[in-house]
Amino acid sequence: MDITRDIRPLTEFKRNTARFMTHLKKTGRPSVLTVNGKPALVVMDAETWQEVNDRFEHARAGAGFRDGLDRARGGLGVEATTFFDGTGAARPARKS
């Protein structure tokens, strides 16, 4: 983010929406829109938003996998055979 170009008043965005859209698509950077000098909104083009969202989801999935592995290593959870046989009889996983 370039704070000299990417933080603008909301009123400027309203007056020059087409110019802002061109800038957002060209740079791929979000813009912070202010109201009374305070940050109020962040806008970005749809392609950039999708890329950011995909990266976030990938990172969140990785964190979930790491958490699951840490829990299993700590002896927490239910063995797969118990989980999938439908009995619901939960017991701690064996420690290796």
Image (spheres, rainbow, N blue to C red):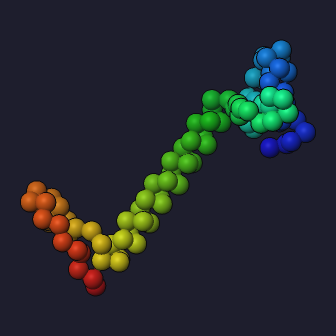
Q: Residue at x 62, y 36 (%)?
A: 49
| 34 vs 22, nearest the viewer | 34
Residue 62 place in picture, x, y as percent: 47, 59
Q: Residue at x 48, y 60 (%)?
A: 63
Classify residue 20 as left or right of residue 78: right
Residue 32 place in picture, x, y as percent: 77, 35
Classify residue 91 as left or right of residue 45: left
Q: Residue at x 84, y 29 (%)?
A: 36
| 55 vs 16, nearest the viewer | 16
Which residue in the rendered view is the most extreme toward the front? 36
| 79 vs 10, nearest the viewer | 10
Q: Number of labelled discs?
A: 0
Residue 23 place in picture, x, y as percent: 80, 28
Q: Residue at x 13, y 60 (%)?
A: 88
Classify residue 67 as left or right of residue 2: left
The vertical placement of 38 against 17, above or below, is below
Q: Quadrant of the C terminus?
A: bottom left
Quadrant for residue 40, please give it. Answer: top right
Q: Is residue 26 visible?
A: no
Q: Quadrant of the N terminus?
A: top right
The vertical placement of 28 against 87, above or below, is above
Which residue in the rendered view is the most extreme toward the bottom? 96
Quadrant for residue 74, please give it. Answer: bottom left
Q: Is residue 63 visible?
A: yes
Residue 87 place in picture, x, y as percent: 9, 60
The vertical placement of 20 against 49, above or below, is above
